[in-house]
């Protein structure tokens, strides 16, 4: 039987005169946040969400090759630039 995730809790905190918030110890411990932890503050209009910044894993060129799904022959730089220019013209002419 899986343990149930903690129920959301609402705590009242105050903003200091310097605009700072103190994240209660209980919340810091639950999320494993210590001094210097980088957090993202997301404004959703009627609420604000605080999340830990997630690092992206290192990506190698080999991981990206073929990610566009293009299956045709390789294009030269001039062919790619011409295709970009054509797409820009089409978009502008709409």
Image (cartoon, grey):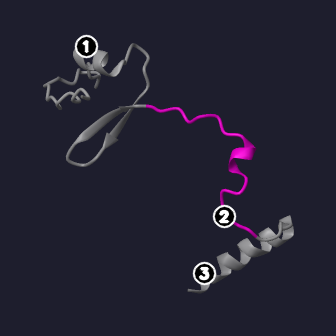
Residue drawn 36% across the image and 33% down it: 51
Q: Position of residue 83 (x, y in %)?
A: 74, 74
Residue at mark 3: 92
The CA distance from mark 3 to mark 2 is 26 Å
Residue 52: within the magenta? no
Quadrant in the picture for the C terminus: bottom right
Q: Secondary structure at mark 1?
A: helix
Q: Residue at x 73, y 53 (%)?
A: 65
Q: Say above or below: 70 vs 52.
A: below
Question: Can you say whether 37 is above or below 69 in the image?
Answer: above
Q: Which residues are magenta?
A: 53-71
**Tag 2 or tag 1, which sits nearer the N-term?**
1
SS category of the residue bearing label 2: loop
Is the N terminus in the top left, top right, bottom left or bottom right quadrant? top left
**Mark 1 = which residue?**
25
What secondary structure prevails in the magenta region?
loop
Which residue lies at the image location 29% right of the left edge and 22% below the top edge? 20
Q: Left or right: 84 with respect to 93?
A: right
> Which image quarter: residue 66?
bottom right
Q: Position of residue 31 (x, y in %)?
A: 33, 22
Q: What is the C-alpha distance between the residues marked 3 and 1?
A: 55 Å
Residue at 85% x, 69% y is: 78
């Amino acid at each position: 039987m899986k343990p149930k995730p903690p129920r959301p809790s609402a705590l009242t905190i105050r903003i200091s005169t310097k605009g700072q918030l103190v994240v209660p110890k209980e919340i810091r411990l639950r999320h494993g946040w210590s001094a210097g932890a980088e957090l993202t503050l997301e404004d959703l209009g009627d609420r604000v969400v605080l999340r830990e910044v997630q690092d992206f894993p290192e990506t190698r060129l080999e991981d990206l090759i073929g990610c566009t799904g293009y299956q045709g022959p390789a294009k030269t730089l001039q062919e790619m630039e011409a295709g970009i220019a054509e797409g820009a013209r089409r978009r502008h002419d709409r």
